[in-house]
């Protein structure tokens, strides 16, 4: 992966460190020659959208495609609705208290903690930085007018994810010229893409990507209040299924003036053999409110992540690759639309307990500072 951009204005000038490393495949697609590739990389580093690349009509078309940006944001920076403790694992996990379903779930979480390195090792972490590559492909599966588009070519990109106790995180994700910046400072969570001038905000919530094998501590805390609902075989691996349902208060907190979140369900599939999380799923149903109240349109988003290649890093067992498939259904009021996006990801580097990681890394956009929502 490319981590440095040369000084294009001065031949003897210092190189600039890229905020998000660029995969070689993405760099090679940025232009027909080295000079153009470096120039487009500099534009990308400045968070300019790809349609300003003077010679890359392919990337301009991708960036201007609202469909791709919409799906890219869903799979790239999705959040989970639960307020999850990020800085330590809950000390009190009585297995025998409660129903059989809840007691079984707590026992499974304990086995998961042991498989990931143990509670003491996980509680010793105070920060994390992960760098990874992604490949994304989209489909239009069905539209109400009968049209269906063929599968896209894969778009390549990379991400950098920072996390610091107690509940700070920030994500920078770039795919073929489209860039997403998202984060949380413990008071507000935000998301902003290169295709829009303003950022969206909401209550602080953890990034879904944490639960794709990157943060065992958060995953354990998430499923502490789950119930065990059965077993399932996934890729020849016998798994326990843990289930979480969003409470009414959580659903209301996610809803807006124009939308109502009907339900949000999370499922975790834990290997009976290794104790590790093999698959992570969540399904969300949103009703779009009509001004006249005479019709309903629904958005249903289903996301399924397969976690693979677990490896120990500084005593912590981390999934180093996987695939997330998101399917979006829109129906009601004579609308029938389905689309799908797949993200294949691979962790290139991950480090814990980063020395000197400043709070400035987790500042929200300036517009939130003006509204008094900053750190």
Image: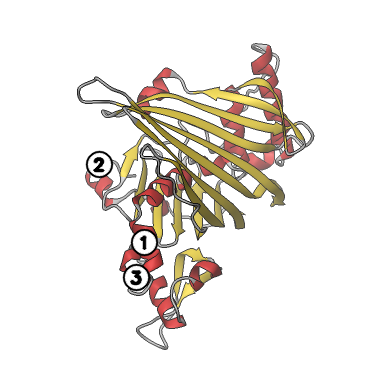
Image height of 169 relative to 23, above or below: above
> What mark, if any, has residue 61 been given in the picture?
1
- Name the residue beneath numbered marker 2: 372
Q: Percent position (x, y) of residue 258?
A: 27, 29
Which quadrant of the rendered structure holds the N terminus? bottom right
Q: Is residue 115 visible?
A: yes
- Nearest the viewer among 314 and 333 is 333
Say few, some or many: other residues with alpha carbon within 10 Å of mark 3 (under 14 / 14 to 19 / 20 or more): many
Which quadrant of the rendered structure holds the C terminus? top left
Label 1 secondary element:
helix
Q: Is residue 166 visible?
A: no
- Name the residue beneath numbered marker 3: 53
Residue plotted at (38% across, 46% down): 70
Label 3 secondary element:
loop
Alpha-carbon span between mark 2 and mark 3: 36 Å
Disc tally is: 3
The earlier-in-sequence mark between 2 and 1 is 1
The earlier-in-sequence mark between 2 and 3 is 3
> What mark, if any, has residue 124 been given in the picture?
none
Say few, some or many: other residues with alpha carbon within 10 Å of mark 1 (under 14 / 14 to 19 / 20 or more): few
């Amino acid at each position: 992966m490319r981590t440095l951009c040369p000084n294009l204005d001065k031949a003897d000038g210092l190189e600039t460190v890229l905020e998000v490393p660029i995969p070689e495949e993405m760099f090679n697609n940025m232009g027909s020659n080295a000079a153009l590739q470096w120039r487009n990389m500099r534009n990308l580093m400045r968070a300019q959208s790809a349609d300003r690349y003077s010679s890359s009509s392919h990337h301009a078309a991708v960036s201007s495609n609202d469909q791709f940006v919409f799906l890219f944001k869903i799979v790239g920076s999705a959040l989970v609705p639960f307020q999850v403790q990020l800085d330590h694992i809950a000390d009190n996990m009585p297995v025998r208290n409660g129903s059989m379903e809840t007691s079984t779930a707590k026992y499974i979480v304990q086995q998961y903690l042991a498989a990931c390195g143990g509670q003491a090792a996980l509680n010793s972490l105070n920060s994390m930085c992960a760098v990874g590559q992604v490949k994304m492909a989209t489909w239009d599966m069905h539209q109400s007018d009968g049209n269906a588009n063929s599968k896209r070519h894969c778009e390549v990109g990379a991400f950098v994810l920072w996390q610091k106790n107690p509940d700070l995180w920030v994500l920078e994700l770039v795919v073929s010229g489209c860039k997403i910046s998202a984060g949380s400072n413990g008071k507000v969570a935000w998301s902003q893409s290169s295709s829009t001038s303003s950022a969206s905000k909401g209550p602080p919530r953890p990034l879904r990507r944490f639960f794709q094998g990157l943060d065992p501590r958060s995953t354990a805390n998430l499923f502490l209040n789950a119930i065990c609902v059965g077993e399932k075989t996934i890729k020849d691996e016998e798994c326990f299924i843990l289930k979480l349902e969003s409470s009414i208060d959580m659903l209301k907190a996610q809803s807006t003036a124009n939308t109502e979140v009907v339900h949000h369900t999370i499922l975790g599939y834990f290997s009976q053999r290794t104790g590790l999380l093999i698959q992570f799923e969540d399904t969300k149903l949103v009703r779009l409110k009509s001004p006249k109240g005479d019709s309903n349109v629904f958005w249903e988003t289903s996301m399924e992540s397969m976690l693979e290649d677990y490896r120990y890093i500084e005593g912590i067992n981390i999934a180093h690759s996987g695939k997330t498939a998101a399917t979006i259904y829109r129906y009601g009021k004579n609308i029938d639309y389905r689309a799908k996006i797949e993200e294949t990801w691979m962790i290139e580097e991950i480090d814990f307990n980063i020395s000197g990681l400043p709070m400035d890394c987790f500042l929200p956009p300036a517009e939130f500072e003006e509204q008094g929502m900053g750190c």
